[in-house]
Image (spheres, rainbow, N blue to C red):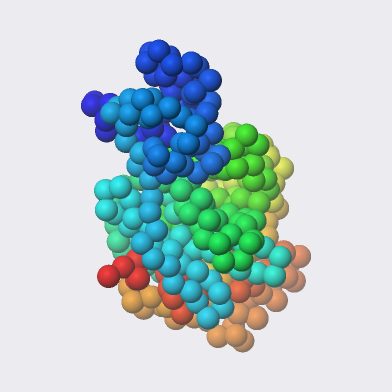
Amino acid sequence: MDKKTKDIRDLSLDEINHFITQQGEKAFRAKQIDQWLWKNGAREWNDMKNIPNNLLEKLSENFHFKSLSTLTHIVSTDGTTKFLFETHDKKHIEGVLIFSRDRVTACISTQIGCALNCGFCATGKLGLYRDLSAGEIFDQIILMNEHLISISKRAITNIVVMGMGEAFLNFENSMKALEKITLPKYLGMSPRRITVSTAGVADGIRKFADLNSGMHLALSLHTADETLRREIMPVTKSNPFNEIIDALKYFHQKTGERITMEYLLLKDVNDSLEQAKALAEFCKNFPVKINIINYNSTDEADFKASSEEQKNRFVKFLESKNIIVNIRASKGDDIAAACGQLALKNKK
């Protein structure tokens, strides 16, 4: 492979150090470059102010700097802000800032598009173009945080990996980016402020458990009826319930963590009392909390949101089984930034 095709952020610190010393430079330059890449948020060579020009030239001759740029952002009536980012190869992804009284949560993407084709999700209708690199995942936080600081003097407090793509099908790059975000020598965000969501990739859940990183796990479950889930979430065909449940048990055993269940209520699909009973039965296997999510309409799907009456019945049944239930406020639906809506709607 031509070295020039490699992103500098795909290299480890040891690999950067090896290259630097081969060029006759002092080893401490590698740590300086590493800090520019993962702490100071450099996105082009000229950002590295304390690196000599001759070394920057050598780096640029051998490596790409495949960073994201912000094409535009749009703001919801509730303040939710959706960003359209462009990659070095002119592909597009979205990220979202969600505001509440005491926190600002960044929702980030891990792939360009998604291969899972969940029936209710607009992103899945795009298909999968490619995985994002660790640098591209990391850049979303840098760019959204820079915007946030410029308008409010606030900073991102929480991260949810719930944007475009399935993080556990881009496991290495997703975890590398999150490691850079959490390590004290880089951005230093507490892992306790990060939640990684999966549609139910059992092998990925196990690998995530083995990291014991302190980050939270959310399962986008949406029905505990396996036959129905195979229809609306085809990932279930290759990750049947017995494998998902075993992986979630393993995660709890390894980490001691409560698992979040994401449940999108769909009228006359998964909102019946029988569905609630199945969900309660599923959740007997490990400590959980359930986030009930209102369905947000998309052009790509024909589902409808459950009525308030049906939602309340569903929630009351779960609570009668001593299950922690949160009804998650839907934000950004007027700009297609809510759950299941990310599909590059603001790209012209």
In the picture, which quadrant includes the N terminus?
top left
Give the image location of residue 32, x and y in percent.
52, 28
With respect to residue 315, does 195 lie above or below?
above
Residue in the image at 55% along x and 56% along y: 145
Give the image location of residue 333, x and y in percent.
48, 76
With respect to residue 291, does 269 lie above or below?
below
Looking at the image, the residue that sits furthest to the left is 2
With respect to residue 317, does 165 lie above or below?
above
With respect to residue 195, does 22 lie above or below?
above
Question: Which image quadrant for residue 10?
Answer: top left
Q: Would you say 179 lies left or right of 163 here?
A: right
Give the image location of residue 291, x and y in percent.
62, 66
Q: Which of 141 and 270 is in front in this view?
A: 141
Q: Which of 134 and 51 is in front in this view?
A: 51
Please say whether residue 323 is visible from this viewpoint.
yes
In the picture, which quadrant includes the C terminus?
bottom left
Residue in the image at 50% along x and 77% along y: 76
Q: Nearer the viewer, residue 343 or 221?
A: 343
Residue in the image at 59% along x and 38% along y: 186
Question: Which image quadrant for residue 211?
Answer: top right
Residue in the image at 54% along x and 41% along y: 40
User: Count of labels shown?
Assistant: 0
Please say whether residue 282 is visible from this viewpoint.
no
